[in-house]
Image: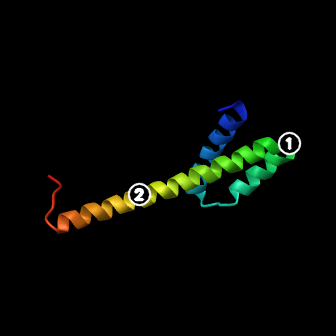
């Protein structure tokens, strides 16, 4: 990635962690506003990074849930997978 994307992704990761800690979902909008005041390119890269990372988090959670359900169903049927 380029400098803009790298910086935006790093900031997105930090903001997502801050949201997890504080529960303040408005952080994304607040940070985007600050970025947009000086660089629309940085703002767009940040918002894209947040969306992509959040989508990835949701997709991984779904995958983990399905794998756990599959394992639980297999164990309840007496199938150990061996």
- Indicate left or right for 39 with 73 as reference: right
Residue 44 visible? The answer is: yes
> Mark 1 and mark 2: span between their CA atoms?
39 Å
Rendered-image quadrant of the N terminus: top right
Residue 36: x and y, percent?
82, 47
In depth, the one of 14 and 74 nearer the eye is 74
In depth, the one of 69 and 10 nearer the eye is 69
Residue 34: x and y, percent?
80, 48
Label 1, secondary structure: give it.
Answer: helix
In depth, the one of 67 and 21 nearer the eye is 67
Q: Of callouts 1 and 2, which one flags the residue occurring earlier in the amino acid sequence?
A: 1
- Indicate left or right for 73 with 35 as reference: left
- Indicate left or right for 77 with 10 as reference: left
Image quadrant in which you'd find residue 11: top right
Around disc 2, counting alpha carbons within 10 Å, would you say few (fewer than 14), some (14 to 19), or many (20 or more)?
A: few
Residue identifier under label 2: 63
76 w.r.t. 47: above or below? below
For the point 76% across and 42% down, the residue is 42
Question: For the image shown, how many numbered marks are present on the structure?
Answer: 2
- Indicate left or right for 42 with 63 as reference: right
Image quadrant in which you'd find residue 71: bottom left
Residue identifier under label 1: 38
Residue 21 visible? The answer is: no
Label 2, secondary structure: give it.
Answer: helix
For the point 64% across and 60% down, the residue is 24
């Amino acid at each position: 990635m380029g400098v803009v994307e790298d910086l935006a992704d790093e900031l997105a990761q930090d903001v997502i962690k801050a949201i997890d800690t504080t529960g303040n979902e408005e952080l994304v909008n607040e940070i985007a506003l600050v970025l947009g005041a000086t660089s629309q390119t940085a703002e767009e890269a940040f918002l894209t990074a947040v969306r992509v990372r959040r989508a990835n988090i949701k997709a991984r959670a779904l995958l983990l849930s399905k794998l756990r359900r599959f394992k639980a169903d297999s164990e309840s049927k007496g199938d150990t997978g061996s």
